[in-house]
Image: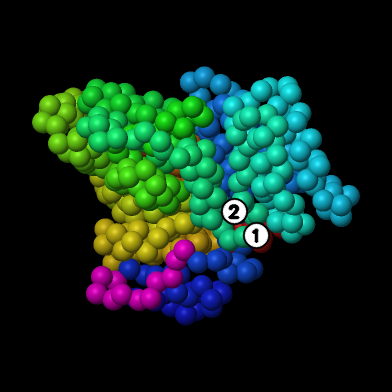
Amino acid sequence: MAVREMDILIKERRESIFCNHKSKHDNFQCDKESVSGTVSQRACVYCGARVVLNPITDAYHIVHGPIGCASYTWDIRGSLSSGEEVYRNSFSTDLREIDVIFGGEKKLAAAIDEIYTKFKPPVIFVYCTCIVGVIGDDVEEVCRKAEKRYGIRVIPVKSPGFAGHKSMGYKAACNALIDLMGELKDRDASVNSKKTINYLGDFNMSGEVWILKNYLEQMGVEIVSTITGDAKCEDLKKAPKAALNVVQCAGSMTYLAKRMEEKYGIPFMKISFFGVEDTKLSLLNIANFFNDEKMVEKAEKLIFDNEGMVNSELEYYRARLKGKKAAIYVGGGFKAISLIKQFRDLGIDTVVVGTQTGKKEDYDVIREITEEGTIILDDANPYELEKFMKEKGADILVGGVKERPLAYKLGVAFCDHNHERKHPLCGFIGAVNFAKEVDYSINSNVWNIIKRERGGHYGKELCEYECESM
Ligand code: SF4
C-alpha cells in the first residue's frame, strides 16, 4: 500500500516509502542514489570506507584530502582494541587551495615518508576523498612507489565522497581488504576439516567481538581473523585460510564474503548476534555447519546456561515495556531485522522501520515480520522520520548519532545502536543491556516533565509551544 500522496513531500521519494500491506507487492525502491535535496541521513562513500577499515588496530590511516574529511570521521566508532591504539589517530594530507591547483601527489608521498620514518607501520591505508577524485591525483602510483621504497603495504582506498553513497564506501574498503589478504598460496583440503572461522562485520563496539569470541571458544571454534573489530594486519593476511566466513553486518561485509568465496573458496553464512532469538540460531547454525555432534552439544549447553541466566531479567523489562511502540532507523537491513525481533520479544511493536543501505531481500524480510500498517522506508530524511514517528505514535527511536537530536527534539526516547553505544548489545548479555537501555529511556521521568512543560507528547503541541514562545 503506498502512503498517501499528501504524506510525501518529495515526489521522487514515493517508491521508497511503503505502508506495509501483506497482499500487495509494490515496486519498492532501495539501494539507489539519494534524491538530491532530500537531506539524506546517509554518510558519504569515504565515510563508509573509513568505518569499515578504521577498527584495524595496528594500521595507519592517511586521509588524502582537506582536514575536514579527517576530522568528520576521527574516532568515529567506539571500537575497542586489545593491543595497539594507533588507529585512534587520524593522519591527513590537509589539502589546501594550492594543492587543488597544482596537485596533491607530492604531499601524499611526503606524508607516507613521514609516517614510515617515524612509526615503521606494517600497513598504510590511503583514502581518496572528494577533492582527490576531482583533481585526479594518481594515488595508486604514489602508493605503488611507496611500497617499493619501504617494503610495506600501502593500499589505496578508492572512496571519493561523491562517487555514490555509503554502500560504495563499504565496497571500496572490502576491495582494500582483499588487496591486503593477497593471493592464497597454500590452501589445501585440510583447511576445510579445521574448526576455523573469520568473523566479518563486527566492529568491536564496547567489546562485542570479545563476547562472541568467548562463546565460540566454548564451542571449540577458533577465530582466525575478526573483520575488522580488534583486527591486526597479520591476522587479516591469514584470513584466506579459514574454513568458514560468518557475516554479522551483512550490509558492509556480504561483498567481501562473496569475493573471498570466489577467490579463496571460503563458504559464508549470514548470522546475527543481536537478541536472544538470533543469537541462539546463529550459534546453532555455526555448530551445524561443522557437522560435529560434540560442538552442537556444547552450543546447546551454552545456550541453555546463558538463556537461564538472562530470562528473569528480561521478564522484568517485558513487564515494563509491553505495549510500547518503536521506530527503527539504522545503517543495514540485518540490524533492523534483529531489532524488530528483539522489540517483539519485549512486547514492543515496530511501527516505523528504515535503513540507509538495506537491500531488497532485507526489505522482503522486514515486510514479512512487521504488522500491516508499519511504515517501511529506505534512505529516509529527517522530515520523513519525524512525520511518521508522530503519525504512528512511536515511543522510542533506535538509531545512530544523527538521529539522536531528532528524537530528543520530539520528546521521544532514544537508544543508540551505532557509533557511540556504551554497552555491548550483542549476545545474551547484550539482549539484557538493550532491554535495560530501552526501559531507562522510555520510562524516564524526563518525558513527563516535557509533556507537562509543553502541554503534549510531541508534534503539533511542541510546534505550537515553540511558535508561541518565540
Ligand atoms: S563528502 Fe567529500 S568532502 Fe565531505 S567528508 Fe565525504 S569525502 Fe570529505
Residue beneath the point at 63% across and 44% down? 156
Disc 1 residue: CB within 8 Å of ligand 1:
yes
- Amino acid type assigned to the residue bearing label 2 in the image: Val
Residue beneath the point at 76% across and 28% down? 114
Which colour style is shown? rainbow
What residue sits right under mark 2 in the picture? 45
Question: Which one is in front, 31 or 227?
Answer: 227
Q: CA distance from mark 2 to mark 1?
A: 7 Å
What residue sits right under mark 1 in the picture? 162
Question: Which one is in front, 49 or 78?
Answer: 49
Q: Is residue 376 rendered magenta in the image?
A: no
Label 2: few (<14), some (14–19) or many (≥20) C-alpha neighbours in 10 Å: many
Label 1: few (<14), some (14–19) or many (≥20) C-alpha neighbours in 10 Å: some
**Going by the picture, which residue comes out furthest to the front?**
185
Q: Earlier in the sequence, mark 2 or mark 1?
A: 2
Expressed as whole percent of the image width and height from the top left, the position of residue 453 reads 56, 48
In this rendering, the answer to whether 219 lies above or below 267 is: above
Direction from residue 318 to residue 45 in the image, left or right: right
Residue beneath the point at 28% across and 76% down? 24
Can residue 279 be seen here? The reply is: no
- Amino acid type assigned to the residue bearing label 1 in the image: Phe
Direction from residue 150 to residue 190 in the image, left or right: left
Disc 2 residue: CB within 8 Å of ligand 1:
yes
Asked which secondary structure carries label 2, the reply is helix
Q: Which residues are magenta?
A: 21-31
**Going by the picture, which residue comes out furthest to the right?**
98
**Going by the picture, which residue comes out furthest to the top?**
83
Badge 2 vs badge 1, beta-carbon distance below 8 Å: yes
